[in-house]
Image (cartoon, rainbow, N blue to C red):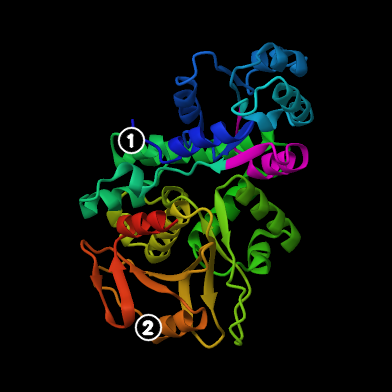
């Protein structure tokens, strides 16, 4: 068992809010985290709303919730019963009046769009949100971890059963089944009638173009569907927390900025499974290696600073930086990402850093130790960078 960084945060939020929504893709460990919280509360009760038996217990949800006053009620895959949100609002308010202010409900879900819309509309001011990502390097690797361990996490990705598989072959098999299950079972269960073959082709195309600017018309042409349909499909993959649209920096630099977002398949292991890459040598020999590493590092850093505003910077004249993190204290960090063990940065990086008025410049690469370059650029590996970002938050 690995200690999840979200565990302490979840406990703290339940002490502050009547309800907490824990979101994350399937098989990321939400239920395990919820049971760890349940073990701290002897009277807590758990319902998996994918089970008909659990759904029947909520035929009269108001009566069920009121019958479990002074208990933490955990509802797994709550997006299956969106009608519950209207009831939850009244029950939370009633339990508040009875002196039960916080820690009433823990809601788990794997479709962020549905959940966040419902909670913002029905439970405004009553609910906190927490995202659980696949395993991060900070959770499964020690400070003195070997480069091979980082490479293994990059190749397999962070889904627990993929990371913990006995071999690379077993890990790839798990991820292939995971992808098929999403396409053939999970997505149709949410309602959208999308051909599984079309969505898989789109998902695979996004893996091939990892980290590139999103060109919906190009994808639409290749798939023989409309650009609007491509946008809707990508919206769905983003809502399921499987794909990330990284926006372009939108500040005023007085220059012609690229405005299209970049798009990433969020878990590097899923990228490699979609492309049929089983082990490190196969990944390193594929053209996607550099952009896959870039996406892997970006996910590590965004997870370490969930409250920071993340974007990338690129101008029409070639000034570019892979990641810009704008913190609530007003600081802006620029981060360049390289797979090389002897990394360097271009003139365009320094121009970009100056344009966004960066207070700190990082170069994250496959290096063993941290060192400094000219003009205040700090070189470090992803684990050290994530720890640095996390401490700053």
Q: Residue 199, position in %: x, y?
A: 62, 49
- Residue marked by disc 2: 346
Of 133 and 356, the residue lying toward us = 356
Relative height, residue 314 to residue 11 (above, below) = below
Question: For residue 369, which quarter of the picture?
Answer: bottom left
Residue 358 against residue 242 in the figure, above or below: below
Magenta stretch holds residue 249: no
Front residue of 248 and 385: 385
Residue 111 is one of the magenta-drawn residues: yes
User: Where 296 falls versus 260 (above or below)?
Assistant: above
- Mark 2 surroundings: few (<14), some (14-19) or many (≥20) residues within 10 A: few
- Residue 248 horizontal/vertical position (percent): 58, 71
Q: Is residue 99 left or right of residue 375?
A: right
Q: What label sits on residue 164 in the rendered view?
A: 1
Q: Locate residue 173, reporting x and y percent.
A: 40, 38
Classify mark 2: helix, strand or loop.
loop
- The boundaries of the magenta stretch are 106-129
Q: Is residue 278 something that shows in the picture?
A: no
Does any portion of residue 390 appear in the rendered image? Answer: yes
Labels 2 and 1: the sequence-earlier one: 1
Quick check: marks 2 and 1 in contact, CB under 8 Å? no
**Numbered badge on residue 349:** none
- Closer to the eye: label 2 or 1: 2
Q: Residue at x 60, y 81 (%)?
A: 257
Residue at the image position 50 percent from the left and 36 percent from the top: 12
Find residue 334 and report its image quarter: bottom left
From the viewer's side, name the closer residue of 172 and 224. 172
- For residue 163, side relative to residue 265 (left or right): left
Q: Is residue 97 left or right of residue 185?
A: right
In what element is the residue under mark 1?
Answer: loop
């Amino acid at each position: 068992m690995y200690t999840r960084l979200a565990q302490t945060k979840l406990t703290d939020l339940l002490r502050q809010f009547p309800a907490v929504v824990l979101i994350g893709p399937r098989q990321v460990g939400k239920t395990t985290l919820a049971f760890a919280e349940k073990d701290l509360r002897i009277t807590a009760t758990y319902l998996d709303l994918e089970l008909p038996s659990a759904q029947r217990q909520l035929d009269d949800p108001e009566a069920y919730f009121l019958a479990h006053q002074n208990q933490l009620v955990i509802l797994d895959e709550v997006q299956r019963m969106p009608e519950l949100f209207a009831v939850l609002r009244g029950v939370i308010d009633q339990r508040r009046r009875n002196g039960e202010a916080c820690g009433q409900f823990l809601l788990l879900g794997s479709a962020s769009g549905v959940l966040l819309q419902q909670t913002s509309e029905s439970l405004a001011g009553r609910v906190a949100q927490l995202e659980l990502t696949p395993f991060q390097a900070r959770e499964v690797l020690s400070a003195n971890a070997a480069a091979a361990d980082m490479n293994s996490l990059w190749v397999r990705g962070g889904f627990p059963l993929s990371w913990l598989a006995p071999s690379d072959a077993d890990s790839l098999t798990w991820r292939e089944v995971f992808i098929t299950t999403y396409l053939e079972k999970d997505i149709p269960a949410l309602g959208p009638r999308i051909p599984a073959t079309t969505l898989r082709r789109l998902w695979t195309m996004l893996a091939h173009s990892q980290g590139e600017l999103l060109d919906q018309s190009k994808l639409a042409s290749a798939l023989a569907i409309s650009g609007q349909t491509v946008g809707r499909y990508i919206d769905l993959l983003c809502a399921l927390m499987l794909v990330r649209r990284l926006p372009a920096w939108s500040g005023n630099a007085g220059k012609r900025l690229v405005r299209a977002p970049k798009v990433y398949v969020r878990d590097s292991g899923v990228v490699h499974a979609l492309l049929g890459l089983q082990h490190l040598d196969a990944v390193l020999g594929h053209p996607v290696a550099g952009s896959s590493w870039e996406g892997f590092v970006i996910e590590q850093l965004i997870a370490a600073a969930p409250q920071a505003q993340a974007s990338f910077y690129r101008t029409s004249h070639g000034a570019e930086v892979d990641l810009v993190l704008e913190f609530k204290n007003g600081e802006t960090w620029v981060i360049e990402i390289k797979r090389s063990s002897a990394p360097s940065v271009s003139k365009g990086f320094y121009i970009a850093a100056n344009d966004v008025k960066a207070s700190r410049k990082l170069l994250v690469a496959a290096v063993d130790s941290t060192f400094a370059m000219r003009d205040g650029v700090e070189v470090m590996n992803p684990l050290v960078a994530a720890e640095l970002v996390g401490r700053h938050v």
